[in-house]
Amino acid sequence: MADVVDIQHHSGARSRPRGELELAALATRQHGVLSYAQLLQLGVGRGAIRYQLAVGRLHPVHVGVYAVGHSAMTKEGRWMAAALACGPAAV
């Protein structure tokens, strides 16, 4: 997937690409955080991740873990970020 951007439909109305909706849904379930590996699995390329970091759409929380959209996090978001940073074997 290239950079996450809005696309135009024939009517001129704007909507979000399917991958972006999946990304938002996962981030919502995970209290606003995603891992680098999850972004790659959702089809977001390395260059797009760098771009999203540069423009402030992703905010580093831990190595390889990002808050999506803003850096204000709940305690559950911080816990989820810590679990993601520890990897799949975290308990």
Image (spheres, grey):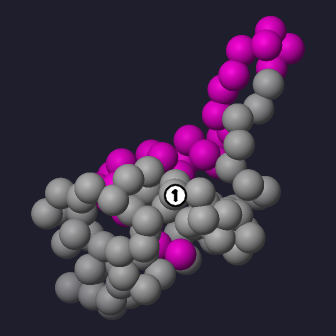
Q: Position of residue 12 (x, y in %)?
A: 79, 13
Q: How many residues crowd around disc 1 within 10 Å: few (fewer than 14), some, or many (20 or more)? A: few
Q: Name the residue under label 1.
A: 56
Callout 1, which amino acid? Answer: Gly
Q: Is residue 13 above or below residue 32?
A: above
Q: In this view, does 43 lie to the left or right of 37?
A: right
Visible in this render: residue 87? Answer: yes
Seen at 79% across and 25% down, the residue is: 8
Q: Is-magenta flag for residue 64? A: no
Residue 58 in the image: state x and y as whole percent. Answer: 49, 61
In magenta, the rendered stretch is: 9-36
Task: Work out whether residue 2 or residue 37 is closer to the camera in this orientation and state it.
Answer: 2
Q: Which residue is drawn at 53% across and 75% down?
A: 36
Secondary element at image label 1 = loop
The residue lying furthest to the right in this view is: 10
Viewer-nearest residue: 57 or 64? 57
Q: Which of 11 and 22 is in front in this view?
A: 11
Quadrant of res 27 = bottom left
Q: Does the magenta stretch include residue 23?
A: yes
> Could you say where residue 5 lies in the image, as x and y percent from the top left?
71, 43
Location of residue 83 (image quadrant): bottom left
Image: 5 above or below 62: above
Residue 26 is at least partly visible in this image: no
Up-down: is 9 above or below 83? above
Residue drawn at x 17%, y 62% as measured from the top left? 76
Which residue lies at the image location 78% right of the left edge and 57% below the top edge?
Answer: 2
Quadrant placement of the N terminus: bottom right
